[in-house]
Amino acid sequence: MRRISGPWDEATMVRWLTGARIPVRLAVTTTRGPLVVSLWYRYEEGQVWCATRAGAAVVTHIQRDPRVGLEVAPDLPPYRGVRGTARATVVPERGVEVLEALLARYLDRSNEPLATWLRDRSDDEVAIRLDDLTLSSWDFSARMVAQPGPVLPTI
C-alpha cells in the first residue's frame, strides 16, 4: 500500500480486505462521468484483483483512464470499511486464473451451477489488477449495533 489513513493500521486493513466476502465497489471515469460497478475481488500482496468479461464496459473505461476509486464496505451497520484510490490495469492472461480464485472465495457447493456457468463463459475473461493503492478506513462499530448481514472479518 502506498499510503493509509483512518483508525485502522495496515495489518487491520489487510485482514478486512482478505476476510470480507462482499464485492468491491469500483468507480471508473466514463465519457459521461463517474460510474460505480460492483465486482468480486481478492486482495493479494498489496494488490486487489477482479475478473470480468473482456467486452465489459468497465474494461473500456479502465483502458481509457486507469485511475479508479474503490470501496469495500457492507450496506448494514455497523458501518466500517476501506476506501481509496488505485491504478487499474487489465491483465488478459490472468483472467481465468483470477476467476477461479474468485469462485473459490465467493461460492460454495450450493452455488455450483453458477460456478459452472461462469467457467463455461471464461474464454474471454480478463483480470483487473488494482495497485498503487491509497486507502483510508472508517469504523463506527463502537457507536452502532450490528445487524445481520454479509460475512465480515473480525478485526
Image (tube, rainbow, N blue to C red):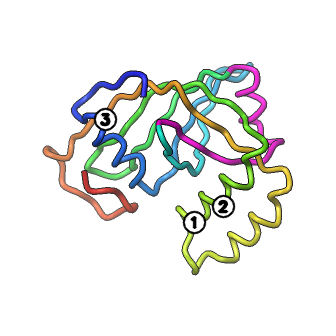
Relative to residue 125, is residue 151 depicted above or below?
Answer: below
Residue drawn at x 63%, y 30% is 35
Q: Is residue 27 left or right of residue 128?
A: left
Circles 2 and 1 in contact, beta carbons < 8 Å: yes
Residue annotated with mark 2: 100
Q: Position of residue 24 (x, y in %)?
A: 51, 44
Q: Position of residue 84 (x, y in %)?
A: 44, 28
Q: Is residue 95 left or right of residue 37?
A: right
* Furthest-bottom residue in this view: 110
Mark 3 element type? helix
Residue annotated with mark 3: 10
Q: Position of residue 91 (x, y in %)?
A: 73, 38
Residue drawn at x 55%, y 30% is 131
Identity of the amino acid at label 1? Ala
Earlier sequence position, callout 1 versus callout 3: 3
Residue 57 quadrant? top right
Report the label total. Answer: 3
Residue annotated with mark 1: 104
Identity of the amino acid at label 2? Glu
Q: Is residue 69 inside the magenta stretch? A: no
Q: Position of residue 122 (x, y in %)?
A: 80, 58
Image: magenta residue range: 46-65
Measure the C-alpha gap from mark 1 to mark 3: 25 Å
Identity of the amino acid at label 3? Glu
Measure the C-alpha gap from mark 2 to mark 1: 6 Å
